[in-house]
Image: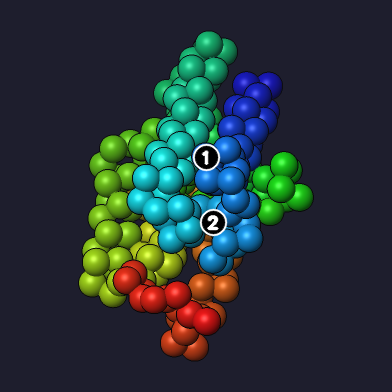
Amino acid sequence: MAYVLVLVIAFLLGSVPWGLVISKVFYGKDLRSEGSGNIGTTNAIRSMGKVGGYAVFVLDFGKGLLSGFIAVWIAGAFGYDEAGVHLATAIAFFGCVYGHIFSPWLGFKGGKGIAVAIGCLFVTFGPVGAIIELAIFAVLVVTTKYVSLGSVAAALACPLLALWFFWGNWIGWLFCAIAGLTVVWAHRGNIQRLRDGTERRIGDKKRA
């Protein structure tokens, strides 16, 4: 019962489309009609500037972090042991990522899941694991100027890191692996553009 509760709450938290909320309330525009049409941080920065874009990142990161903390609290309130609490954080990770990518408020469409995933991983993997994910992302973005490449690499690393953090807890590992691979799937358009050489780099001018 605790796991079901964690899943539902994390999914609902993840589903809040902060990019769309901020664009409509503070900028009078629909982020889905701007740039790539995505409600995530990258498109928010390009469409609303750094202030609006970073606000989207903080709020998306925050709902992931909150999902993880709520999972710990619920599992603890139900008297679960350390392994049970850890499994709850994996379920929270899965739930908030899926809520973000498949938001019911947007017709089961949404963002690509990086900010919310990293936020929750600070609880699911702990600070060390989350920082490793951030480092993978940052190094590739800085060296290649492709945000999408860093995002995909970090998502692909998730199932591998989960082997370490959830060794022996194969249900927890499965939730993490599915969530990470779903983030890769959400970047399928970016992956195709990377292959075609048409993906935008940081600093590129908007294509006609």
Q: Can see residue 176?
A: yes
Query: How is this picture coloured?
Result: rainbow
Q: Is residue 74 left or right of residue 109?
A: left
Disc 1 packing (10 Å; few <14; some 14–19; many ≥20):
few
Q: Write the residue at 49% across / 34% down.
A: 63
Tell me if residue 147 comes above or below residue 130 in the rendering: below
Residue 163 visible? The answer is no
In the rendering, which numbered label is found on residue 38? none
Callout 2, which amino acid? Lys
User: In the displayed structure, would residue 111 be above or below residue 17?
Assistant: below
- Residue pictured at 35% horizontal, 51% vertical: 50
Q: Position of residue 163 (x, y in %)?
A: 40, 51
**Which residue is at 46% across, 37% downward?**
59
Number of the label disc, if any, that sits on residue 26: 1
Residue farthest to the bottom, as pictured: 196
Q: Nearer the viewer, residue 46 or 62?
A: 46
Quarter of the image for residue 160 reads bottom left
Outermost residue toward the right in this view: 107
- Above or below, 71 against 60 in this view is above
Q: Which residue is mark 2?
A: 112
Please name whichever residue, 190 or 180, is drawn nearer the observer in this view of the structure.
190
Quadrant in the picture for the N terminus: top right
| Mark with earlier residue (2, 1) | 1
Is 132 displayed left or right of 146 in the figure? left
Expressed as whole percent of the image width and height from the top left, the position of residue 168 reads 45, 42
